[in-house]
Every structure is written in structure tokens, then in C-alpha cells.
Image: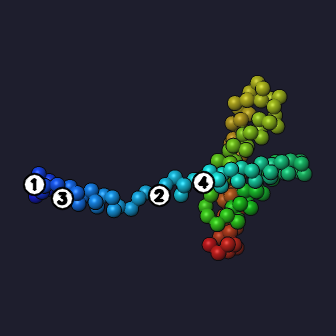
Amino acid sequence: MSDRTESTAGGSSDGESWLASLSAMPSMPGAESYFSLRATVGIALAVGAGILLGGMTLPAGRLTGLAAVAVTIGALAPRRLYAEVVTAGIAIGGISALFNHALLAAGSGESMAAVGFSTGLMVCLTGYYLGRLARSRLGIGGS
């Protein structure tokens, strides 16, 4: 400990080398490596289209369309996009629940949005997981 005190008190060369070694440390990965806003918007548009097309074709088509899009994205995406898929599912699920049940949402909009958020979360997360599982089991995409 006295060596450290003497070297820092004696001159600034040790302080400069410490500063240089600090700047040579590898940088932390940025937020872009964990979450992509561009991917989230694209997934949200795809999920919205899946809900719209599913709702026009099948009686329980909204959830089926939501799950089909999530499975497809999970099977075809080259990297993991769990945060983006969950964010898009929550947003689109809540918005579609409020728009589909506008008269009911007038009195209890918060609970209707909560049901939509949680349904979007669970369906998108489960569908995306199953798509990733199919990708790994079937060897789709090489990884």
C-alpha cells in the first residue's frame, strides 16, 4: 500500500498509465444489442396484420393469427428477438382489445387493456418460443 501511495504522490506518470489502461478496457455492449426498435415496429406491424387477417377468416382468428405470426417469426428470425416480440405482443394485444370492445372499455378500460396486454404477452411469447423450438429441432436457418 505504501508503494501505491509513493507512486501516486511522486508523480503523475502512474496516474496517466492507469487512465490509459481504463480507456483500453472493452466497452459494454449498447442497448441496441439487446433491443431493436426497428425490429419491434416491424414485428408489431406483422402481428397487427396477423390479428386483422385472422379475425376476418376464423371465429377465434385473432388469437390464431397472433400465434401464427409469432411462430413464424420465431422459426425464421436469425437471432433471438424475445424482447421485441413480447413488446409488440403487449402493445398490439392491448390496442386490439380496446378497439374490439370499445363499448365495454368505456366503463372498464383499464381492466380491458390489462386483459389484452396479458393475452398478447402470453400468446406471442408462447408462439415465439414454439417457433424457436421448431427452428432448433428442424435445423431451420443453420443455427
Going from N to C along the chain, the mark reached first, 2 or 4, is 2
The mark found on residue 10 in the picture is 1
Say if mark 4 contacts mark 1, CB within 8 Å: no
Residue 32's spot in the image, x, y percent?
Answer: 54, 55
Report the Cα–Cα distance between label 2 and label 3: 29 Å
Taking the spot 74% from the left edge, 61% from the top edge, the residue there is 72
Residue at 77% of width from left, 40% of height from top? 96
- Could you tell me which residue is drawn at 71 percent across and 35 percent down? 113
**What residue is disc 2 on?**
29
Position above or below: 139 against 66: below
How crowded pointer 2 is (Cα within 10 Å; few <14, some 14-19, many 20+) is rated as few
Left or right? Give the position of 8 relative to 122: left
Question: Between disc 3 and disc 4, whose residue precedes?
Answer: 3
Circle 3 is placed at which residue position?
14
**Residue 37 screen position, x and y as percent:** 62, 51
**Which residue type carries mark 3?**
Asp
